[in-house]
Amino acid sequence: MKISNATLGDLPANVARPHYDRAALTPGIVHVGCGNFHRAHMAVYLDDLFNLGEGHDWALLGAGVREGDAKMRSALEAQDWMSSVTELEPGNHSARIIGAMAGFVPVEAGNASLIKAMSDPAIRIVSLTVTEGGYYIDPKTGTFSPSHPDIAKDAANPATPDTVFGAIVAALGARRGAGVAPFTVMCCDNVPHNGRVTRDAVVGLARLIDAELAEWIMSNVAFPNSMVDRITPATGPRERAMAAAFGLEDASPVTCEPFRQWVMEDHFPTGRPALEKVGVTFTPHVDKFETMKIRILNGGHAIIAYPGGLLDIHFVHEAMEHPLIRAFLDKVETTEVLPIVPEVPGQDLNDYKALIINRFANPEVADTVRRLCLDGSNRQPKFIIPSIRDQRAAGGAAEGLILLSALWCRYCEGTTDSGAVTEANDPNWEMLQARARRAKADPAEWLAMAEVYGDLGQDAHVAARFAYWLDRIWAEGTTAALTAYLGDDF
């Protein structure tokens, strides 16, 4: 059955649906980037709140600035802005229809409709999921890049911006001119210190356009930090079949694990929905939760991804079934990552690690190793390199983390241990592949990527151990390298 307002009452009994009057919803949030993660995370929390009979003036107005966003808008429009979310607990799937979206701004060049929507006084939050790589961070400095061509173009054409940050600056300028309080900008991307990073992008672009507006934004606009978490695979034939198994015709179904977490700073000057009533944690210690999650979960993804990719393993749960990979994950997390993660209020790090291992092993999610290997040039500097740096600062050897870095280098060469070709899997794939091939003879070539390693390449210990492990991987293969690292622990 096709999802629509008209069919909600006729859906199969085992499909949960909104228990509120969707016609009575009014938008309070413009959300840019309505992909799978947003619809399995923020939209679900809001749907839960609306089902409590609360916050109906905080409905979502979807938005986007890219071609894929236009396709998503078309798919959701045909379904009255709803989509299905299927939670994949081992041995038990459950489906629900999410109705928290009240509309979707037309996606167009120049973003006039988006700017108009964000200028509406009823909109009090603008939220973002534009991927980890969407914040125009200079890889060499780790800060906002005002010279990026996209940013320079928006600065030259502020009334017709192409980027979401240009649209935000234009809308904030319009609100300031009209005497309307600014909206809060809430990043929901998996980026360290994501509120600060988003502020730097918005203010950095504003400074190129109007210095006074930039200062006003700095003084008046809130950019709360947050930590978001839910494993949400890409949608393919398997996921579409799951929706169909519930009797649903959904142009863009979402599947996800049962677990979800959202931790935020409570800094919303113009108000916010009462999300604490549906499980969101508001705390001034977001940075500690964030470090825990990024180092243990996101870092853990990398630890299993690259050996899994080199051993031709397709699914993440299959990688977790491989005894060497699972033992590699456990040892690196226990001996190298947990010791340098700060204490988190109310959290036991060992329990959190055990939770992560169980989540990775969930066979129902069917997340792919290839997805975890994606975009290493952007993810490694955020999820792995800081742990190596902290280990070295504490006098540690970081042996397993350095081995992981060598495995990433070997993966980027473009073939697996069996000789199978690895298709491009990074925005910088050609550069990485060329460098990885040179690194086979000269490992220092890889560590010379300052945008990834900073000055770690000048650390004699890191350089020597990286060269050792890369040479051993090439000479003996991934299995032998993992076995050597695990030693008597395996």
Image (cartoon, rainbow, N blue to C red):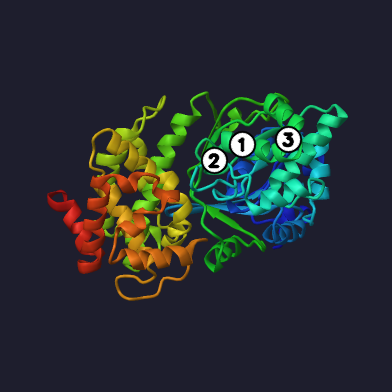
Residue 314 shows in the view: no
The kind of residue on which mark 1 rests is Asp
SS under mark 2: loop
SS under mark 1: helix
Along the polypeptide, which appears first: circle 3 or circle 1?
3
Q: Is 156 left or right of 258, judged from the image as shown?
A: right
Residue 80 shows in the view: yes
Residue on which disc 3 sits:
58
Residue found 39% across the figure and 64% down from its top = 435
Residue on which disc 1 sits:
200
Q: Nearer the viewer, residue 291 or 257?
A: 291
The kind of residue on which mark 2 rests is Thr
How far is mark 3 from mark 2, CA to CA? 32 Å
Where residue 201 sits in the image (x, y, percent)?
63, 40
Residue 48 position (above or below residue 476): above
Residue on which disc 2 sits:
143
Residue found 72% across the figure and 61% down from its top = 75
Q: Nearer the viewer, residue 255 or 427?
A: 427
Where residue 430 sits in the image (x, y, percent)?
47, 67
Where residue 270 sits in the image (x, y, percent)?
73, 25
The kind of residue on which mark 3 rests is Trp
Where residue 133 sits in the image (x, y, percent)?
55, 50
